[in-house]
Image (cartoon, grey):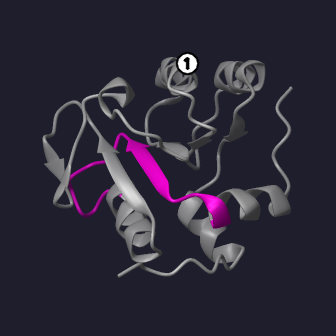
Amino acid sequence: MFISPSDSDIKNLLSTAKTIAIVGLSPRTERPSNGVARYLIEAGYRIIPVNPGQSEILSLKCYADLSEVGEKVDIVNVFRRAEDTPGIVEMAAAYNAPAVWLQQGIISQKSAEIAHRTGMFFIMDRCIKIEHQRLAIGITKSS
């Protein structure tokens, strides 16, 4: 059974993370994923867009899937349907991502089990932007 991480564990993750891959990032500014990505960029995170239908989002190179990223990410943030998430979590584990975050409204017990089995930090059904704001994480945009 999934047990949500404590506020202090979430704050620690968000305070130490530098690079976040956003799976399902939309190029459309009105979409929640796009707004969250823009917020995270302003908060100082490096964002890596992952969307097979795009080559660039927010002026950043976009990858078709996590296997193409080719660099370490601290958090894999997911904006996809719950039924799509177990494969994403498996891929994140294969590429040694330390954390997977399923956005608010995305609930997958199977994904939680995969993350637990592989030792990944896992959050589901929470918005990374809301949690960042709520916990008053002090990351600032780097120059």
Q: Name the residue rendered at 20%, 53% in the picture.
A: 27
Position of residue 12 in the picture relative to residue 97 (left or right): right
Give the residue at mark 1: 90
| 26, 100: nearer the viewer | 100
Position of residue 99 in the picture relative to residue 109 (left or right): left
Q: Does the stretch in magenta take in 29?
A: yes
- Image quarter in which the C terminus is found: bottom left
Position of residue 136 in the picture relative to residue 41 (left or right): right
Q: Name the residue rendered at 39%, 60% in the picture.
A: 46
| 67, 125: nearer the viewer | 67
In this picture, is 121 found above or below 119? below
x%, y% of residue 127? Answer: 58, 57
Identify which amino acid the numbered label 1 is placed on. Glu
In this picture, is 92 found above or below 36? above
In this picture, is 109 found above or below 6? above
Q: Name the residue rendered at 84%, 63% in the picture.
A: 8
| 1, 142: nearer the viewer | 142
Quarter location, residue 50: top left
x%, y% of residue 82? Answer: 54, 28
Instruction: Kindly state the secondary structure of the residue where label 1 is placed.
Output: helix
Q: What stretch is highlighted in magenta?
A: 15-31
Q: Does the stretch in magenta take in 20?
A: yes
x%, y% of residue 118? Answer: 71, 21
* Residue lying farthest to the left in this orientation: 55
